[in-house]
Image (tube, rainbow, N blue to C red):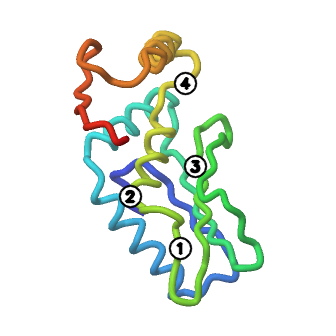
Amino acid sequence: MLVESGLNIYILGSDLTHRQRQRIQAQVRTALRSLPTWLFDLVRERIDALGVANLPLIIEPLSAARQHSQVISLGRIDSRPTVKLTPKLRRNGIDWGQDLRRLLAKAVAYISAPGSDSSDFWRRWADAGGRGPPSRENGGHRSRLPRRD
């Protein structure tokens, strides 16, 4: 699905009806198309760096009996970064737990992040995170809100 994204999207679930599977495909396709194209440039860079054909995104909707609170899981399969989404099946449709575009943006961010061997990237990431919230001194654009008493 969506070859240009570089993602190999698996929809798991033997108990899914054809209509449910189509609905999931349509929702994912629409959400992926709404994301900026430069995100997929990052995915393609990561694919090239790993020397693989694509990166997996697994979607396994859960029935009411098998529900859990975690809708996104991050991990690795065959040394490739992998994301698993577990939306809930409802009688009236699919509940992604949050905006599907946001979930897919998180998935793409995880999949396209450099490997642990890129120590410079991760050092700069840690440095940026350790500075605290944005302020005018470190380049942020924090707005000042009046205090509530």
Q: Earlier in the sequence, mark 4 or mark 1?
A: 1
Between 72 and 24, the one nearer to me in the picture: 72
Q: Measured along the vertical axis of the image, is residue 50 above or below residue 10?
A: above
Say which residue label 3 marks. Answer: 83
Q: Nearer the viewer, residue 119 or 22?
A: 119
Residue where numbered disc 2 is placed: 101
Kind of residue sitting beneath label 1: Asp
Which type of secondary structure does the marked residue at label 4 adopt? loop
Upstream in sequence: badge 1 or badge 2: 1
> Which amino acid type corresponds to the residue marked 2 in the rendered image?
Arg
On-image quarter of the N terminus: bottom left
Give the side of residue 121 with respect to residue 57, left or right: left
Q: Please tell me which residue is depicted at 65% across the width and 34% down the height of the picture.
A: 79
For the residue marked with disc 3, what is the amino acid? Val
How far separated are the C-alphas under marks 4 and 1? 32 Å
Element class at badge 3:
strand
